Image (cartoon, rainbow, N blue to C red):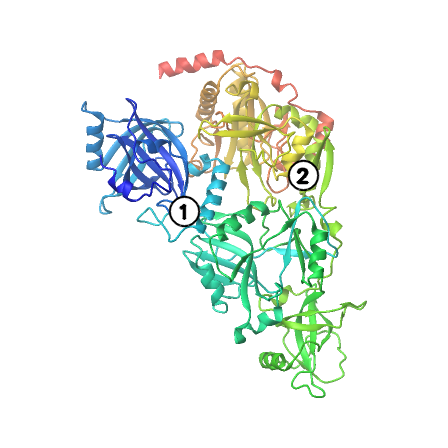
Amino acid sequence: MSLAKYKQKRDFKSTTEPQAGKSKGAQHIFVVQRHHASHLHYDFRLEVDGVLKSWAVPKGPSLNPADKRLAMEVEDHPYDYKDFEGTIPAGNYGAGTVYIWDKGTYELLRPDGSSFDKEALKEIKDGDLKIVMKGKKLKGEFALVRMKGRGDNSWLLIKHKDKYAQDQYDSEDYTPERVKAQGLKEKAATSAAKKKRVVHLSEPIPSKQKMKKVYKPMLATLVAEPFDGDSWLFETKWDGYRAIAAIKEQQVDLYSRNQKSFTDAYPDVVSALAKLEHDAVLDGEIIILGKDKRSDFQQLQQYKTTGKGLLVYVIFDLLHLDGNELQHLTLLERKSLLKDLLAGIKDKHLQYSNHILKNGIKFYEKAKGEQWEGIIAKRTDGIYEEGKRGKSWLKIKIVNEQEALICGYTAPRGSRNKIGSLVLGMYNNKHLEYIGHCGGGLNGETIDELYKRLQSLIIKTSPFDEKINTNTPVTWVKPVLVCEVKFQEWTSDGHLRQPIYLGLREDKPAKDVHPEKPKQPDMATTENDRTLTLNGKKVVLSNQTKLYWPDEKITKGQLIDYYLSVAKFLLPHLKDRPLSLHRFPNGINGPSFYQKDLDLEHAPDWIKSYTMVAESTGKEVDYMVCNNEASLAYMINLGCIEVNPWLSRLTRLDNPDFVVLDLDPEKIDFKYVVETALQVKEFLDGYDVTSFCKTSGSTGLHIYIPTGGKYEYQTTRLFAEWVAKQVNGLLPKTTSVIRAKASRQKKVYIDFLQNSRGQTIASAYSVRPKPGATVSMPLLWKEVNERLKMSDFTINNSLQRLNEKGDLWQDIKNQKNDLRNVIRSIDKQAVTN
């Protein structure tokens, strides 16, 4: 078949994509390539008649028969494209990152005896192709059906109901995190060379995560002194307007921290941002940049009327990129993406905010010598805490500056007209307090502008509760206009000494104007971090005072303390088991993400890991292994509230040590979970099978059936399914084995699907990311009764129980149920049925 269209679209001098290729085997192959181009999509390719027939699938293939995936037919590709993986350079058709997501062979579902290619081409021509796929991820029967009335290139990719079908499926869940991150990074970098937006498909591809309507900027805490720190970077503190820029399909929305629009006020910045060929949300500062490379706030005040000065949007953070929320990434990761994103935009109105690492004191001295406003310190491993003033962003000022509310103005004296001085105030615990008069910095032009703005705000009485002494009469105004002043110092009675007016703050709401007095930096650095020596290794622990459970006032440091206190009980249950990391860098109320592939580049060299080829992806994955306290502390410091090990160990990865049943209530009283657990025990006792029970720490119970690693996952999965269905038959009104939530309302779901290679479940003594900081606690069977509550075991009382009762599961590894008699019963029943 002709590859003319394929070759016409490509410049093979600048792309490594193959030009041709011939089939080399009797079997027909398929390949699915994850393509992170202008939009993320999946290319579904089938070998037919010597070429790869190709469809672009926006949402990716699914094993859920209910998902009818749109598939847009595109040009044929050469056979050798099956092995293509890498980056298509910017400026080329389909520029972006290509990753082989799945590959294998396929057969026709209903062969009629003619040649394979002839039959396949006929089914494609008829718009109804039925195939059987034999890949690592995609298995079983699929259909490709052309959509009627949508043109010849619009198809649906549909999974048939068979033993490989799943109730829920998202292809992105089976993509390694490092591939996702690399795709984002390279995609941002293509801005440097792209000339115009390239879109493969005739329809827009839905984003993975929608851009929010409003993003609230993260704020910095004022500290008194500069400092050095290995986990910190330092940036210039600019004197301007804080602004969020949201770019969607090259339409720009620029707004202040109180959502006041800047879009019309600063068209030069908006035009520059419109050049970005990516959807993005940026955080930065709008400034006037002087010839001395310093920002000039007073000139910025006058820019709207004078248009004088170089207007620059200095950008220091990236919150969203092409359907991906990035707040959970570390600051260094976000800034790396941001730098690549801006690399291709050469515009004087945009500037990337550079930084230095570690040497804050030296940077401060440079800033002081060059008369900057100050510097900003940020933790390199910090996430973006939207709308919060935390301790991972700090500001150190060289010039004392303060926002204040204009509460009135005094009558002028001498040659001054209209305004003598401004009466200033600010809120302290919702109470408006007087902080002084300000006459310095007011000139004729400034006074005229202020006077005009204040006339509509005049009120009859003072907004202060206390009496304010002034030398001349005062005109009182509503305290809604925010200004910025610089001053010498705070006096002992809470007033500003020698304040000088700098200008109005259009980006600050009045309610947010509070006294800003510097803290000592050790409150935010030394106290917030600590270093422990465990197993002879130094473990640096960060953000120890961050609240992980705000309602319970439990911090990250307390979570680590809990895990270290129970380590001697917990670690035997983790020994030599691969771990899936579930990270909550901002506590239980913040975003979380899963990480199977450990970042070895940034992990200490003493962390144990195990590299294996993931069955679902065919790629190498470095799993973390936690065998000692140092590794445990390191893992929890990454934000892992819970600990999720495999059911098998490194010595026999295909042979789990347990069969597990997860009893999960769906809008049904917990007493029915207890009833189900006791029914499982009674059923297993009938076959002389020993079982153990623990709370899940979430909503249900976990039942473990030790096997001693004698059986492979295929066998233990079959056994778990059989037990689940037998118990469901005994309790049909209150239990279900159907995964879809809609089909198991007001029932206890007996989940047996965890019994597969690579699946994980919360360990004994693992904390769970739930209100109350509950713990997954092993139980005696006599404790499994209607008095049992999930809240019985928390981070605060579990150690006491362990000290009193010890590890109830200490001998679970020595229990080795012989399942052969039970399996024979299953086989007999299967034959009978």
Looking at the figure, which quarter contains the C terminus?
top left
Residue at 40% x, 15% y: name it.
Answer: 829
Q: Is residue 633 visible?
A: yes
Q: Quadrant of the N terminus?
A: top left
Examine the image and state in which quarter residue 367 appears: bottom right
* x and y percentages locating residue 661 in the rendered image: 52, 26
Assign a secondary structure to mark 2. Answer: helix
Q: Residue tagged by mark 2?
A: 559
- Tag in front: 1 or 2: 1
Q: Which residue is mark 1?
A: 90
**Depth order, front residue of 818/521:** 521
Q: From the viewer's perspective, is 708 left or right of 379?
A: left
Which amino acid type is shown beneath numbered disc 1? Ala
Question: Which of 80 and 267 lies nearest the eye of the viewer?
Answer: 80
Front-most of residues 141 and 485: 485
The answer to whether one can see residue 62 in this image is no
Where on the picture, by quarter, is residue 124? top left
